[in-house]
Image (tube, rainbow, N blue to C red):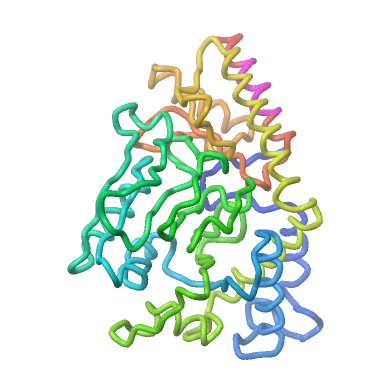
């Protein structure tokens, strides 16, 4: 029986990437060293770093002359603090769109930066975060930037590209859970950041894509927190997460071979439609997310009966459909169907839902 991992993160990697990792573990590029042993100062790593950075910007259709890429540690959560330290320098005030838990966390952590004011300018709290709020384009205050979360892992909501306007102030996006899983006009954003453990690599790497005009050195910041310093040192001010960057490089090559972001989004849309249609037909389970705001990466669903939900998760696990338990904040179940999840995995889940319905 094939095993399918529906975890929200760390999530499954493409089988082709796993196979290449297995090959490179004992001897990377005929160097006699494991890929986990190569130095971040070596020509091997520098070549890997440059190729990974170039492939990422190519897939995002961004110009290397205008954007830079930082490969950082500390998780996307660290950027809730580091980004305002770097960007909130003129007005000391930022705007946040509250679309759920991680947007709230971003606002809460930013508010702890001394002298910084954080305004929640739109929220979907009134609908229990079952739909994304409209992003304002006119503001009563001067802001250093506007922060949004493009995909809400826990709530199962997401913005489409046509729901994201171009704004006069810099827009910062946390794309952790749908990074490179659906198309956006990435040039709308001044900064994009994402934890890699959903669509790109093992946990331990955070990717930050930033407009070069924002790379201004701040002498009052430690080097590890200063984006300009990190950029100048090519993300190697200290030892970078070499293995994670290597895996990200493989995942980007895999994505290019699949036809890029547009092609993988078409597959992701097909997977999501299959699962949402299955839930619509189910007599036990439902998605509570507004159809116009549904994520194609994370699909929460509930029965309304915690005991039945627990039984579902238990039986699904026995059928090698793993990590379907929902987040503690919303309960129920959650199927995360990132880029690496094959259509066959979603079909297996739908078949199981139908069989479970027949027995319950």
Q: Position of residue 35 (x, y in %)?
A: 68, 77
Q: Position of residue 215 (x, y in %)?
A: 46, 78
Q: Is residue 162 above or below residue 195?
A: above
Q: Position of residue 49 (x, y in %)?
A: 65, 78
Q: Nearer the viewer, residue 315 or 20?
A: 20
Residue 258 left/right relative to 113 = right
x 33%, y 63%: residue = 144
x 26%, y 66%: residue = 91
Magenta residues? 347-355
Residue 19 in magenta? no
x 61%, y 9%: residue = 358
Q: Is residue 135 above or below residue 187?
A: above
Quadrant containing the N terminus is top right
Q: Quadrant of residue 108?
A: bottom left
Q: Quadrant of residue 355?
A: top right
Q: Is residue 278 above or below residue 43?
A: above
């Amino acid at each position: 029986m094939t095993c399918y991992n529906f975890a929200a993160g760390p999530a499954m990697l493409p089988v082709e990437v796993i196979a290449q990792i297995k090959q490179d573990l004992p001897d990377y590029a005929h160097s006699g060293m494991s890929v986990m042993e190569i130095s971040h100062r070596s020509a091997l790593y520098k070549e890997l770093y440059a190729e990974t950075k170039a492939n990422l910007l190519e897939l995002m259709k961004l110009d290397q002359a205008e954007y830079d890429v930082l490969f950082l540690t500390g998780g996307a959560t660290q950027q809730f603090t580091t980004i305002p330290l770097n960007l909130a320098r003129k007005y000391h005030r930022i705007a946040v769109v509250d679309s759920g838990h991680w947007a709230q966390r971003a606002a809460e952590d930013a508010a702890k930066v001394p002298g910084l004011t954080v305004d929640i300018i739109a929220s979907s709290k009134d609908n229990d975060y079952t739909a994304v709020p409209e992003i304002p384009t006119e503001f009563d205050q001067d802001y250093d930037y506007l922060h949004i979360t493009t995909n809400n892992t826990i709530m199962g909501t997401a913005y489409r590209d046509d729901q994201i306007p171009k704004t006069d102030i810099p827009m910062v996006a946390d794309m952790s859970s749908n990074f490179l899983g659906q198309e956006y006009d990435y040039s709308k954003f001044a900064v994009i950041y994402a934890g890699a453990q959903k669509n790109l690599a093992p946990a331990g790497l955070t990717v930050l894509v930033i407009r070069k005009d924002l790379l201004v050195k701040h002498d009052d910041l430690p080097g590890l927190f200063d984006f300009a310093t990190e950029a100048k040192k090519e993300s190697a001010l200290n030892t970078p997460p070499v293995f994670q960057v290597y895996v990200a490089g493989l995942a980007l090559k895999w994505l290019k071979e699949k036809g890029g972001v547009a092609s993988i989004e078409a597959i992701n849309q097909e997977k999501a439609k299959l699962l949402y249609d299955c839930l619509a037909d189910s007599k036990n389970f439902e998605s509570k997310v507004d159809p116009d705001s549904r994520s194609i990466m994370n699909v929460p669903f509930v029965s309304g009966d915690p005991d039945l939900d627990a039984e579902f998760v238990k039986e699904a696990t026995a059928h090698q459909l793993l990590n379907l338990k929902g987040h503690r904040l919303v309960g129920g179940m959650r199927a995360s169907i990132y880029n690496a999840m094959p259509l066959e995995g979603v079909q297996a889940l739908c078949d199981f839902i139908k069989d479970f319905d027949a027995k319950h």
